[in-house]
Amino acid sequence: LVGAAGLSALLLLWRPGAGFAALGPAAGALPRGSRARRFAVQECKGESFVDEAITGTAQGMPNVLVLSFSTTWCGPCKLMDPKVAELSKAFESQARFIKIIGDKDPDGMQLMKRDGVRSVPQYHVYKEGKLVASISGAKYDELLHAIEEHTA
């Protein structure tokens, strides 16, 4: 049985000859293990990965990059994570999103020191290879405004 909350997450559609098809978060998902699967917010794979992403904004589309700095113990970061994931989906074709977890990811602390991150959450918006906005704290509206301004 599915509770009321589960009903909003999973809808079933009857298709003649095909039976029930699920609609919802998994609808249209690629097969498990598929290399073609695209994650809206990418995990940090190290300093060179981030540097290539920044350089990439000067070379083509998307020309906007959002770096999301956090730590595993940061409460406000955890509150912002789903909101940032929504933004990454809304701006999927216009911006790239990378999450850097300072105390977990490869080169995480080094990247935070290099980029002057002293508090989390912090968001850096790059456009065409240059830092154009920096938002400190769980300030969704400011982050949204910065992304809208630089993807317009």
Image (spheres, rainbow, N blue to C red):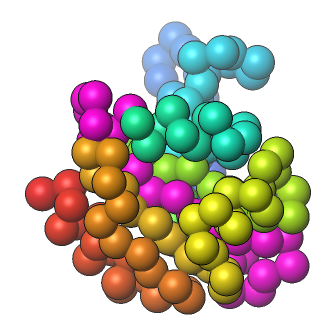
Quadrant location of the C terminus in the rendered image: bottom left
Farthest-out residue, left? 152
| Frontmost residue, 56 versus 41 | 56
Q: Position of residue 56 (x, y in %)?
A: 38, 33
- Which residue is drawn at the image coordinates 30% and 65% (left, top)? 132
Q: How many marks?
A: 0
- Which residue is drawn at the image coordinates 34% and 71% (left, top)? 133
Q: Position of residue 35 (x, y in %)?
A: 66, 15
Q: Is residue 119 positioned above or below 88 on the image? A: below
| Frontmost residue, 50 versus 39 | 50
Q: Is residue 120 positioned above or below 34 on the image? A: below
Q: Is residue 63 magenta?
A: yes
| Frontmost residue, 110 versus 70 | 110
| Frontmost residue, 143 versus 103 | 103
The quarter holding residue 75 reads bottom right
Quadrant location of the N terminus in the rendered image: bottom right
- Which residue is drawn at the image coordinates 79% and 71% (left, top)? 71
Q: Position of residue 73 (x, y in %)?
A: 86, 79
The quarter holding residue 49 reads top right
Q: Is residue 140 magenta?
A: no
> Magenta residues?
56-78
Q: Is residue 61 visible?
A: yes
The quarter holding residue 20 reads top right
- Which residue is drawn at the image coordinates 32% and 54% (left, top)? 130
